[in-house]
Amino acid sequence: SDDRPRYTIPFEVEVGGDGGGIHAAILRDSKLQIQIPIENAPPYVAFDPKAGILAALEYDQESEAWAAQLQSDSPAAVFRAIEALAETDHAEPLAALLADSAVHPLVRAEAAKALGEQRRTDLLIAHATDGHARVRQSVIRALGNGTDGTALTVLERAFRTDRNPDVRASALGSIESLAKTRSVTLARSAVRSNNPAIANMGARVLGEHGDLGDVDTRRSMRMRRRTRMGGMRQAAKIV
């Protein structure tokens, strides 16, 4: 019989700590064997740290190891660690990442999303006015996962005053998740906004939770055409 593997794929493994680094390996028929001489157990091990393999890859390690992997120089390894920590109650490393302005905004935004999945409103609220719009929007969205109305005041302030319209639209979406009745009141003003993102969010909220009195507003010729078309589709839900 032919003992040759059906396929081989070049593979990389990143080992954290002293004596670590990125090591090359070969994946043969879904089997990987690699030996790396190190004196102590590594703080983390990241498989395919540069996301070079076009395949779904799953591996697991302790929460402490995922937290240590946040220090990787490989962005893909960091994002994988954030994703894994979101499924744990290990919030402190994510909070530290979000608070570090030297970290890339995309990484900080992903940390905020993870904290939202953990429902850590207490660790998110302080960053609702972050200087970077991408981070701020991620925080605002994450606050919508809260279990009570703690963040409502912050969210309503963001909806009314944030300088970025996408953040304002996201704030309305989060308010909807926490307080549907209040979101309808705010949506009635949002649909009259000159900004499509805000107006469309208002139309969506009214479509989900509005009443018959909102139908004429959503069909109004004063609304932008794209928003009005969306409003008419949502109005059908009310009727």
Image (cartoon, helix red, strand yellow):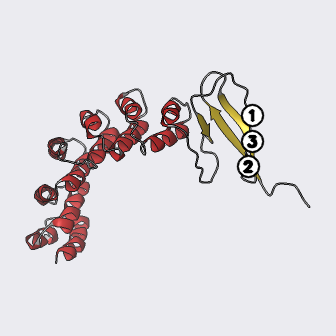
| Disc 3 target residue | 33
Assess whether mark 3 and mark 2 are in contact (beta carbons under 8 angstroms). yes
Q: Quadrant of the N terminus?
A: bottom right
Q: Residue at x 17, y 64 (%)?
A: 223
Q: Is residue 200 left or right of residue 113?
A: left
Residue density around tag 3, few if under 14, some if 14–19, many if 20 or more, within 10 Å? few
Which element type, helix, strand or loop, lies under badge 3?
loop
Looking at the rendered structure, the kind of residue marked 3 is: Gln
Q: Are marks 2 and 1 in contact (CB under 8 Å)?
A: no
Which residue is label 1 attached to?
A: 35
Residue for point 63% across, 21% down: 18
Q: Nearer the viewer, residue 184 or 85?
A: 85
Q: How many marks?
A: 3
Picture quadrant of residue 105: top left
Relative image position of residue 227 (x, y in whole percent): 23, 65
Q: CA distance from mark 2 to mark 1?
A: 14 Å
Which amino acid type is marked by label 2?
Lys
Amino acid type of the residue tagged 1 in the rendering? Gln
68 sits left or right of 108 in the view: right
State whether residue 108 is above or below residue 203: above
- Above or below residue 107? Residue 166 is below
Q: Which residue is mark 2?
A: 31
- Which residue is found at the position 20% from the left and 64% from the top? 203
Instruction: Compute the Cα span from label 2 to label 3.
Output: 7 Å
In the picture as drawn, the residue positioned furthest to the left comes out as 213
| Residue 94 on image: x %, y % | 39, 34
Per the image, label 1 sits on a secondary structure element best described as loop
